Amino acid sequence: MGNHDMLPVSEGHDGRSHPEYTLQEATCGILLATIECDGNVAFDEVAWFDLVTDIHPIFRNEPRAHINQMIDEMRERLNNEGWRSLIDQCGRCAPEDARLAVFALTVDCIFSDGVVASEEWDMVHHLQQALSIQELEVRSVIEVLALKNGCQAWQTPTVK
């Protein structure tokens, strides 16, 4: 049971049909797909997303109005095309030097509500492929963020 109304909504949408997303747009799309991929939008995930878009260096120079516009556009794409398609589109647009950071933000988001659904692990694997992240890097990110978020080793499944 998803609660899509918990995500912020604002006015504006630029209607691009074949996007070339900026790093900020790609990150926003990936994070929204992450939050919604299991069909359950947890309050902790939304609070985490709001915090990231307020303070993370990727979003630091973005006016809140533009962030809200990105959210609207990505939510529309997510609702129309599904999370796999949005991850693929955004993954192609993420700059090489930012991909590991975007991947780490995604894993942190997944751990933020304390519940890791199987759909979220499927999404992590899909994102790993879309961003071309090596398995050793994936394992490192998961281990560090599991520690950061207080997850036990037995709670983090083996990376595919």
Image: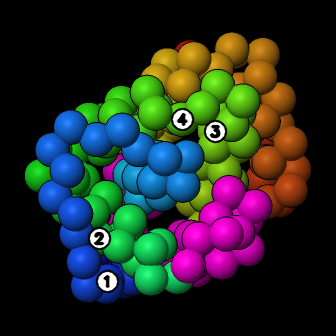
The x, y position of residue 13, in whole percent, is: 22, 69
Badge number at residue 94: 4
Q: Which of pointers 1 and 3 lies earlier in the amino acid sequence?
A: 1
Q: How is the image coloured?
A: rainbow
How far apart are the alpha carbons under marks 4 and 2? 19 Å
The x, y position of residue 90, in whole percent, is: 41, 39
Q: Which of pointers 1 and 2 lies earlier in the amino acid sequence?
A: 1
Q: Is residue 111 magenta?
A: no
What amino acid is at disc 1? Answer: Val
Residue that carries the numbered disc 3 in the rendered image:
103
Q: Quadrant of residue 39?
A: bottom left
**Which secondary structure lies at badge 4?**
loop
The x, y position of residue 93, in whole percent, is: 46, 33
Asked if the residue at tag 3 contacts the one at tag 2, i.e. Cβ–Cβ closer than 8 Å, the answer is no
Badge number at residue 9: 1
Instruction: Examine the rendered structure and indicate whether residue 59 appears above or below residue 106.
Output: below
Can residue 30 be seen here? no
Q: Quadrant of residue 118?
A: top left
Asked if the residue at tag 2 contacts the one at tag 1, i.e. Cβ–Cβ closer than 8 Å, the answer is yes
Q: Which of pointers 4 and 1 lies earlier in the amino acid sequence?
A: 1
What amino acid is at disc 2? Answer: Asp
**Which secondary structure lies at badge 1?**
loop
What amino acid is at disc 4? Answer: Ala
What amino acid is at disc 3? Answer: Phe
The quadrant of the image that shows the N terminus is: bottom left
Instruction: Examine the rendered structure and indicate whether residue 69 appears above or below residue 57.
Output: below
Residue that carries the numbered disc 2 in the rendered image:
72
How far apart are the alpha carbons under marks 1 and 2? 6 Å
Part of the protein shown in magenta: 35-63
